[in-house]
Image (cartoon, rainbow, N blue to C red):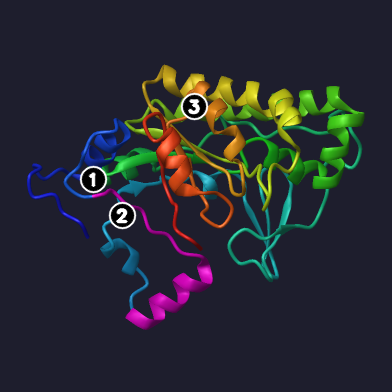
Amino acid sequence: MFINKGKKSMNRKERVKQALKFQETDIVPYYVDFTMPAYDKLAKYYNDQNFIDKIGNHFAFPTTRNLAGWKNLGNEKYQDEFGAIWNKTIDKDIGTVDNSMLPDPTLKNYIFPDPYKPGRFDGYEDFVQKNKDKFIVHAIGFSLFERAWTLRGMENLLMDMILNPSFVEELLDKIVEYNLGIIEQATKFDIDACYFGDDWGQQHGLIMGPNLWRKFIKPRLKKMYDRVHKSNLFVLQHSCGDIKELIPELIDIGLNVLNPFQPEVMDVYDIKKNYGKHLAFWGGLST
């Protein structure tokens, strides 16, 4: 660990905030996470199921997932509150979607979950108080494009962008409406940032291409980013794959931190050189 002896020692929250203001810190803030198989191996090796608590991670992520309608269906299958069934027999971390909640390009018979469901944020304040020295991030996974394809199917959604664009607009708007309800509640707590998880990239370029991303994704991202900034919080975006062509536009709509910044598909040194004065990067290590 590199320590700058000329800098006053900070707590983890202060360290991350200073780094996000592009100011030098006493040490580089970090967050280390593991896939479930890797976590299990390390826990067995150290004989400690809570070994990760000793790493000193700078971020803390309160969760509302267990209070939001997830059901254990048995046989390593789980159903989320949107109705998608996740099969985790092979991929233990995320899984694959086994069903289609929207077999046709219509929302006529589909009811979205209630972001204001009673009990969703039970225990949230306790978590925040116990982690006051950390940079607290509310995470919304599968936040837009991913949520849409988990309901409609990847191939169907991509075809809909050409064949049924009004349906895609309606679907994405409903997802944003749900997310804004979650953000409204989360930002009432003493948190520091909101994180959006949404993979747009593949090994070379974007899954849907830049024009469709600009049409369907970008304006809705801006709406969510603006709501987070309204509460004076930072915006973190996760998107796997080669999304380098989007970086200037993400900066323009208010992104503060990009993750995972994959060196397998992007030149992290060149991107840091070109955009490092305007955007912080979280990741950059090969997986």
Residue type at mark 1 is Arg
Q: Position of residue 56 (x, y in %)?
A: 26, 57
Question: Residue drawn 28% across and 40% down?
Answer: 16
**Closer-to-camera residue (69/216):** 216
Of label 3 and label 1, which has the lower sequence position?
A: 1
Secondary structure beneath label 1? helix
Residue holding disc 2: 57
Residue holding disc 1: 12
Residue type at mark 2 is Asn
Is residue 153 shown left or right of residue 199? Answer: right
Position above or below: 136 against 56: above
Which mark is nearer the camera, 3 or 2? 3
Of label 3 and label 2, which has the lower sequence position?
A: 2
Q: Quadrant of the N terminus?
A: bottom left
Magenta stretch bounds? 28-46
| Res 106 seen here | no
Quarter of the figure with residue 7:
top left
- Dot 3, crowdedness within 10 Å: few (<14), some or many (≥20)? some
Quarter of the figure with residue 280:
top left
Magenta stretch: residue 37 in it? yes
Residue holding disc 3: 251
- Dot 1, crowdedness within 10 Å: few (<14), some or many (≥20)? many
Question: Residue drawn 32% across and 31% down?
Answer: 190
Q: Distance between the residues labelled 1 and 2?
A: 8 Å
